[in-house]
Amino acid sequence: MKNVAVILAGCGVYDGSEINEVILTLLHIAKNDATYQCFAPNIEQLHTINHLTGEVMPDKRNVLTEAARIARGDIKSLIELDVTQFDALIVPGGFGAAKNLCDFAIKGAQANINEGVLNACKAFAKANKPAGYMCIAPALIPFIYDNAVLTIGNDADTAQALNALGVKHINCAVNDIVIDEANKLVTTPAYMLAESILDADAGIAKLVSSVLSIH
């Protein structure tokens, strides 16, 4: 039975992990007879967004504490992630992936990645273990892999910024995936394109299945 590390970025599409993407990811891991453990960096998130109004709130929130809401408390600090205990890595999207795990949402092609996130993700790359990134989470990939091929869907400006960071972006439909065989890397647009949970599910199901089938 394969074991998958899942890195979260908070709780909520606008300032953390996209909740539907996380739940669909965990569901499909279980449906593929694999197990998972969620992790998140123990850091303050960039800001807190009122998901009803879209406005910034004065609250200061912690990424790990917020991510624990989705994981029903079954989550560990990212510094506890031991790559030797896992067969694969999956990183769901949501703006937190581009605000808390890195600052791509703020700086675009001049972005930097959180050191703890970089170390954890690079450990899987160095161990030649498969990984899946969805939605805007592929913004992390240029810092982790050399000459990677990926997708965030078909947004031209985002694709251009990612290409400037040294990757090759491939346009992709919401229900499909892009596989970088050399890097054992799978990406899918998810809610970068999805207009419903069914749209998101189609690509995420393929991503999870593909990640778990790569040897």
Image (cartoon, helix red, strand yellow):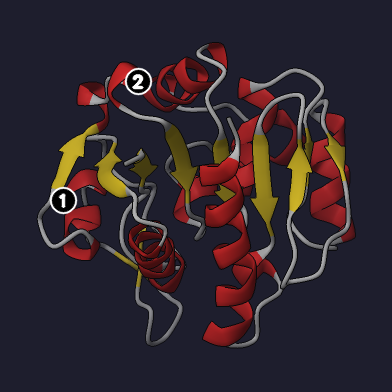
N-terminal label among 2 and 1: 1
The quadrant of the image that shows the C terminus is top right
Q: Is residue 100 left or right of residue 208?
A: left
Residue 171 % position (x, y): 88, 57
Q: Amino acid at mark 1?
A: Thr
Residue under the image location 71 percent in, 73 percent down: 193
Asked which secondary structure carries label 1, the reply is helix
Asked if residue 39 is positioned above or below residue 118 in the image, the reply reads: below
SS under mark 2? helix
Residue pictured at 21% horizontal, 56% vertical: 66
Mark 1 — residue?
Answer: 65
Q: Which mark is residue 83?
A: 2
Circles 2, 1 touching at the beta carbon (< 8 Å): no
Q: Amino acid at mark 2?
A: Val
Q: Residue furthest left?
A: 73
Instruction: Using the image as rendered, state which of residue 214 and residue 17 is in the foreground.
Output: 214
Quadrant in which the N terminus appears: top left
Query: Label 1: how many residues lie within 10 Å, few (<14), some (14-19) or many (20+)?
Result: many
Q: Residue at x 42, y 86 (%)?
A: 53
**Residue in the image at 45% along x and 34% along y:** 88
Task: Tell which tag, 2 or 1, sits nearer the viewer.
Answer: 2
Foreground: 167 or 38? 38
- Is 113 located above or below residue 95 in the figure? above
